[in-house]
Amino acid sequence: MTSADSTPNCSADVQTIAKVPTTAPAPSTQTIGFLQESQGNNSSMRLMCLMALITAICFGGYTLVNSKQVGNVGTNLTFAFLAAAFGGKVAHKFAENQ
């Protein structure tokens, strides 16, 4: 057996490897803001979630400071705004996928 007979035939592998691009695509130069979607469009859903979260934090802080005057109403409002902040985003994600 000669050394030429023991070498595997790799011509198909070389052709496949040659088809792979050697350079990565250039990254997009467009910067996307915090309240924008991946395409760069403004997202009112993200704005609503952010506002509901900030409102829940404010109600929670007020409830902690004035717990005797506010009672259960402050706690209920805090959880309602937290549910609006995160539940709205979950519902929006399911609606987008369908």
Image (cartoon, grey):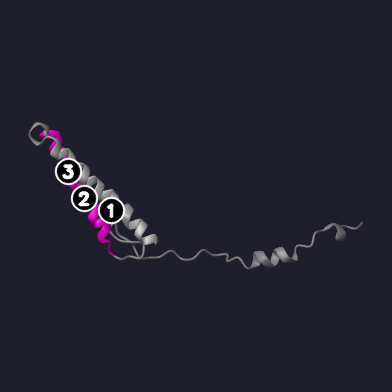
Task: State the residue in front, 26 or 85.
Answer: 85
Confirm or deny contact between disc 2 and disc 1 (CB under 8 A).
yes
What residue is shown with label 1? Answer: 88
What residue is shown with label 2? Answer: 52
What residue is shown with label 3? Answer: 77
3 or 1: tag closer to the N-terminus:
3
Residue type beneath disc 2: Ala
Quadrant of the rendering where the C terminus is positioned: bottom left
Task: State the residue in front, 27 or 95.
Answer: 95
SS for callout 2: helix
Magenta-colored stretch includes residue 74: no
Q: Return the residue found at the far right.
A: 1
The stretch of residues the image draws in magenta is 42-66
Q: How far apart, in angstroms, are the residues tagged by discs 3 and 1?
A: 16 Å
Q: How far apart, in angstroms, are the residues tagged by discs 3 and 2?
A: 11 Å
Task: Report the residue at 19% width, 42% height from top.
Answer: 78
